[in-house]
Image: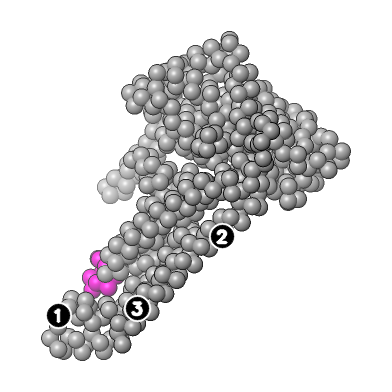
Amino acid sequence: MMKRKIMTIVLSIILISTFLPKIQVLAADNSLKKVKSKETLVVGTSADFPPYEFHATLDGQDEIVGMDISIAEKIAEDLGVKLEIQDIGFDSLLPALEVGKVDIIISGMSASDERKESVDFSEVYYIGGQNIVVRPSDNEIYTSKDDLYQKKIGVQTGSIQESLAKEQMPDSSILSLSKITDLILALKTNKIEAIIMEKPSAMAYVANDNGLATFDGGFELQEDEQGAAVAVKKGSASLVTAINQSISTIKENNLTEDYLKEAGELLKESQGQDGQEDSKPKTIINYWSYFAKGTGYTILISVLSVFFGSILGVILSLMRLSDRKLIRLPATAYVEFVRGTPMMIQVMFIYFAVGYLINIPALASGIIAVSLNSGAYISEIIRSGLNSVNKGQTEAARSLGMSKKTAMRYIVFPQALKNIWPALGNEFITIIKESSIVSIIGVGDLIFQTKIVTSLSYRGIAPLAVTMVIYFILTFSLTKLLNHYERKMNHDQI
Ligand code: ARG
């Protein structure tokens, strides 16, 4: 009897998990309705891909611009809704679409057959071509992909260039990074010999940087790998139809040409190369507003996470001190689990997996993930602090007639605090540095801004140096501050 019940349950789970995705697809297509009812079209993109999409400083403001953004604007306009752009790493775009963080992807994304298995595409709006980017000094040596036999080449993670490299250059070794700007840096510092990149983007990088050269890669391309299209969640026929209408107007009026021209000008303008006599080359200081913004976010995330982490830490450590197993066990399990898994996965889990149920914005997801992580470590700090107080102290207090609670509060805890404090300070410092992991889900912290500055300035090392100094100033002032309080605390007790 029991066996049959178990069998039925197992079978239903298998059935449900195989058919649920299909049922979801069959479910009424309300994709267009959904966008219209929230009056906003959320577009995911990876803004490291001029002239398709890139960051530009216009009138001192950071903006994401480019051909794809103009297309997004047109689609939003035709739908009569507002446009919201989310800048996400290229390899996280498809997951973001699947869990509904974004409504569509416009990111120079090729409508490859492989991708068509998990998402749907609009009509192709632009056909690029595949180039190879090298250092100018190598321009004579390498002229096609075959010259790069057994050499190190760079590609963007999750891009069709990555598959092209794997399939058509099997003897070369591949470095795959999630941002093209990082690939450019790797090329310039001789870490790799070449980058495979879409032709328009390769041309844009080369035009803005005389430390780069490019040529046609001579790849054999399948039909489906040629053109860029808009990606939507599977089963969004109504949304695709609407998008295709905008795309056909764009094509009929040759608007992509205009968009590309505009993008080219914006790229130059943002580079300070708009032909004006007085436009001096920009130094890294010109980008201070990005660093300031990033520092603000980093401080905000760290302070809030340590605050919430401390509350959680206190609760967890009290639970772990309990006499009851049922209370102790979950807390121990939590701490062990959090300590045993990488924070990067925790951040992505909160953003993508939990976000599947409730849509938490990136910044909040980041703060929640870092707080949950920090809580586990802080609970350990508090627990070991309390344990470090000699048992005799509690016993003496109890024999004086104090209750367990009073003894803890007035005798044990003040002594424990002396041990907890420095460790807590260390945790704070760790959080300032480690919270940088939230940049992967698009939170604009210091690391995220550094990447933007790298792409805007076409310089790799200077932004890193500035960021390093800022982190050091943050952590060093915190150390000084904590030391001050630590001394005060010791003083008070003498
Ligand atoms: N067309 C290539 C692909 O679909 C590269 C696109 C990269 N886009 C970007 N915004 N970085 O894989």
For the point 49% across and 67% down, which residue is it?
476
Q: Is residue 269 above or below residue 433?
A: above
Label 2 amino acid?
Val
The magenta segment is: 319-327
Q: Is mark 2 within 8 Å of ligand 1?
A: no
Q: Nearer the viewer, mark 3 or mark 1?
A: 3
Q: Is residue 62 above or below residue 241?
A: below
Q: Which mark is residue 488?
A: 3
Residue farthest right in this picture: 140
For the point 72% across and 39% down, which residue is it?
209
Q: Which mark is residue 151?
A: none
For the point 30% across and 84% down, which residue is it?
493
Disc 2: which residue = 469
Disc 1: which residue = 403
Q: Position of residue 145 (x, y in %)?
A: 79, 36
Label 3 amino acid?
Lys
Q: Secondary structure at mark 1?
A: loop
Q: Nearer the viewer, mark 2 or mark 1?
A: 2
Q: Position of residue 429 (x, y in %)?
A: 46, 65
In three-dimensional space, the C-alpha distance between marks 3 and 1, rounded to whole angstroms, equals 29 Å
Dividing the image into 4 quarters, which one contains the C terminus? bottom left
Is residue 364 rendered to the left or right of residue 143?
A: left
Q: Earlier in the sequence, mark 3 or mark 1?
A: 1
Category of crowding for the residue at label 2, using alpha-carbon neighbours closer than 10 angstroms: few (below 14), some (14–19), many (at least 20): few
Category of crowding for the residue at label 1, using alpha-carbon neighbours closer than 10 angstroms: few (below 14), some (14–19), many (at least 20): few
Is any part of residue 25 visible from this angle?
A: no
Is residue 471 on the magenta stretch? no
Q: Position of residue 168 (x, y in %)?
A: 74, 36
Residue farthest front in this picture: 278
Q: Position of residue 48 (x, y in %)?
A: 59, 38
